[in-house]
């Protein structure tokens, strides 16, 4: 049975609730020579405490000096169908917590544990639909994590799980905001550091994202992988991995910078560049001959990247030369847009094809002229041969040539 009462510690009265194992019926000396003197009798549950002052309604202190046992300062066991402890703050001007736990040791301020299979170790809920406050807030002045999730089940589970089950258009399961990392996830095995899943469908007339990242200056979503081998039966070694059946595995959007930036190799079974006529404007014709002349004048060489330790060879123009030749991709002269280099190549090929057709026509005309001249030469040769035969005959017979 739990006991509740006023105790004196160091001359000050403290309202304390202690378990039987931690309750001293007789005064006990502690390290600072203070005494724990019970000033009230034991109360039997249910116990209701109503308080309108400025101090906590209930203050529980365990200084660890009791020799009567090593049990908890308060132990509540509910065998019925209601809560073991119910704490409510009804004053809307009250800025303090309904439950507050602090520890000077190495344990936790507040711990919730469930031994069943259908409950939560801890649950934080906001019932006011107009409230914009988080259900759970973690704050630290140290160097550790404000919110930390640890999975000890070797089979499956989740360290930290967030679910936005609202039917409204916008809802965030887990949102992180930080000076460097908003949400940081790490895994020591073949699992996932941060996993996001959305069950929304297009039939719901909204958008659902498993993981959405936003940044004002740096990275919205950052993934890093330093593994060398995969032990999950063919799954990729990826810093960021996305999988989709009908939508986008990984989606990035930017109106001024890069929707995605990869400082390394990029592999794909297919690259699809958006080229819909309906998203384009300001169409202008291209002078194929001038473009072809610029392609011919543009330097193309073989080179290797400076940061490539293997110094693999590549062939192509530099972005600066490409920009000088065609002035595409705005003011950016350190990158080559795949759409632009493909368009330049196609336009050059088209111009070459036009020139080839023109030359083919010229060749065909020359061949026709040659054929006509050959036919004329053959005719002249035949007439010359006939004339020579007549001359020879007239010479033998002494006759004249008609």
Image (spheres, rainbow, N blue to C red):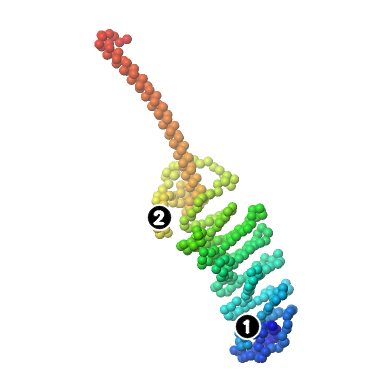
The quadrant in which the C terminus is found is top left
What percent of the width, then of the height, locates residue 374? 37, 24
**In the structure shown, which secondary structural element does the residue marked by tag 2 occupy?**
loop
Q: Could you say which is closer to the camera, residue 331 or residue 199?
A: 199
What percent of the width, then of the height, locates residue 63? 62, 84
The residue indicated by pointer 1 is 71
Name the residue: 56% across, 56% down. Answer: 243
Name the residue: 42% across, 58% down. Answer: 308
Q: Residues within 10 Å of mark 2 (few under 14, many from 20)?
A: few
Name the residue: 59% across, 65% down. Answer: 176
The vertical placement of 227 against 89, above or below, is above
Please give the label number shown on residue 312.
2
The quadrant in which the N terminus is found is bottom right
Q: Could you tell me how far apart the alpha carbons at marks 2 and 1 are, in whole angstroms? A: 68 Å
Q: Quadrant of residue 195?
A: bottom right
Q: Could you say which is closer to the camera, residue 395 or residue 161?
A: 161
Is residue 11 shown to the viewer in this render?
A: no
Label 2 or label 1, whichever comes before in sequence order: 1
């Amino acid at each position: 049975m739990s006991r509740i009462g006023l105790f004196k510690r160091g001359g000050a009265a403290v309202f304390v609730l202690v378990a039987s194992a931690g309750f001293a019926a007789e005064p006990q000396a502690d390290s600072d020579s203070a005494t724990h003197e019970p000033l009230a009798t034991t109360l039997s549950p249910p116990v209701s405490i109503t308080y309108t002052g400025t101090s906590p309604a209930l203050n529980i202190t365990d200084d660890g000096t009791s020799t009567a046992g090593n049990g908890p300062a308060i132990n509540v066991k509910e065998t019925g169908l209601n809560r073991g402890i119910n704490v409510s703050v009804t004053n809307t001007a009250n800025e303090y917590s309904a439950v507050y736990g602090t520890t000077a040791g190495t344990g936790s301020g507040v711990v919730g544990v469930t031994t069943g299979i259908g409950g939560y170790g801890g649950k934080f809920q906001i019932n006011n639909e107009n409230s914009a406050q988080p259900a759970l807030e973690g704050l630290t002045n140290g160097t550790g994590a404000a919110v930390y999730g640890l999975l000890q089940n070797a089979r499956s589970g989740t360290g930290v799980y967030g679910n936005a089950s609202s039917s409204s258009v916008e809802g965030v399961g887990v949102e992180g905001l930080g000076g460097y990392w908003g949400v940081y996830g790490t895994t020591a095995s073949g699992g996932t550091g941060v996993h996001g899943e959305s069950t929304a469908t297009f039939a719901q007339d909204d958008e659902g994202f498993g993981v959405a990242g936003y940044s004002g200056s740096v990275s919205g979503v950052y993934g890093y992988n330093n593994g060398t081998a995969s032990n999950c039966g063919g799954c990729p070694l990826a810093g960021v991995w996305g999988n989709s059946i009908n939508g986008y595995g990984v989606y990035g959007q930017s109106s001024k910078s890069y929707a995605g930036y990869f400082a390394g190799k990029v592999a794909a079974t297919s690259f699809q560049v958006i080229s819909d006529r309906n998203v384009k404007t300001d169409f202008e014709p291209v002078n194929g001959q001038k473009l072809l002349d610029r392609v011919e004048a543009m330097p193309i060489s073989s080179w290797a990247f400076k940061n490539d330790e293997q110094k693999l060879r590549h062939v192509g123009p530099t972005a600066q030369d490409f920009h000088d030749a065609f002035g595409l991709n705005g003011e950016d002269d350190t990158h080559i847009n795949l759409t632009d280099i493909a368009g330049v190549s196609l336009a050059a090929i088209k111009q070459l094809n036009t020139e080839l057709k023109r030359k083919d026509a010229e060749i065909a005309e020359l061949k026709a002229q040659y054929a006509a001249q050959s036919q004329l030469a053959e005719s002249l040769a035949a007439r010359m041969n006939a004339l020579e035969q007549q001359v020879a005959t007239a010479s033998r017979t002494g006759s004249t040539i008609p």
